[in-house]
Image (cartoon, rainbow, N blue to C red):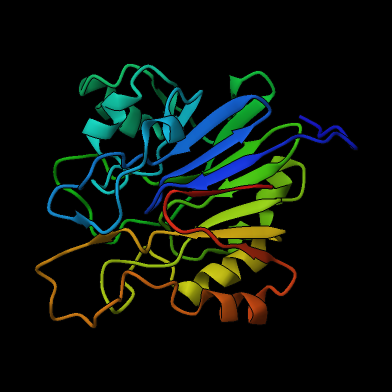
Amino acid sequence: MRLRPGRLVTTRLAWLGHSTVVLDVDGARVLTDPLLQAHNGILRRMTPPPRRDQWADPDAVLISHLHHDHAELSSLRMVNGAPTVTAPANADFLRGKGIRGATGLVADDWLEVAPGVEVRLVRAIHGHRPMPHRPNAANGHLLRTSAMVVWFAGDTSLYDEIAVLADLAEQPVDLAVVPIGGWGARLSGGHMGPREAAEACRLVGAKQALAVHYGTLTVPAMSRFPRGWMQRPGGFDLALADLAPGCERIRLAPSESVTL
């Protein structure tokens, strides 16, 4: 797909908390890693759940991996029927759980999920804590339309091939959606902290960045960790200014949106 120069399209971006993002572009709605309930298992939501009108009727749902904070079955059933794009092993598992639209993609394949809106899987490194009861495939996504190219990183460590994602899209990356937190005061494997996320934005050449994977969920039993370790963006602004000064941060709180 080649972007049509000079075309103006209104694009609406909403962050619904954690890694749940809604992108309304070119008449299509794309939803990532939906967490739509009040809580997520033992994890407590610190903000109200998103309103139905903020996420309803997506044309595609993008799943990065099957950890429960990214692939909550009760939330996926709320959007059941939409193409749910993920790795083949993950799609097989989700179909077995009644997620009818689960669609597995392999490397290099693009899938048109709405007229003029295509997605493909890209690499993610997130195998630090494998689950015994679900597949452990992990991926990010590239999305391209006539208006823009977006990289949804998923949960991942840094890797050198981030620098070639724009080549895969055949266009510069306009927006990077990057995680900036893990599940502890010390960053665990398979995650990026604020500085790693800023470096990823530099590597991919993103014009704008949205930080996710913080500020939404907490674990009540983890009182030994410093207060606020999952609530704050942890220096992402400074890291972005230092490492990727040409990349503008989009500032959103959970359930806020912005017109790009």
Residue at the image position 46 percent from the left and 59 percent from the top: 253
| Residue 182 point in image, percent of width and height | 33, 66
Q: Nearer the viewer, residue 202 or 13?
A: 13
| Residue 192 point in image, percent of width and height | 44, 68
Residue at the image position 42 percent from the left and 20 percent from the top: 82
Location of residue 45 by image quarter: bottom left
Q: Find the residue positioned furthest to the right.
A: 6
Task: Determine whether 182 is above or below 172 in the image.
Answer: below
Location of residue 171 by image quarter: top right
Task: Determine whether 171 is above or below 79 in the image.
Answer: below
| Residue 93 point in image, percent of width and height | 25, 28
The answer to whether residue 242 is visible is: yes
Task: Determine whether 165 is above or below 231 in the image.
Answer: above
Q: Is residue 179 left or right of residue 151?
A: left
Q: Nearer the viewer, residue 3 or 51?
A: 51
| Residue 127 point in image, percent of width and height | 31, 56
Residue at the image position 52 percent from the left and 32 percent from the top: 30
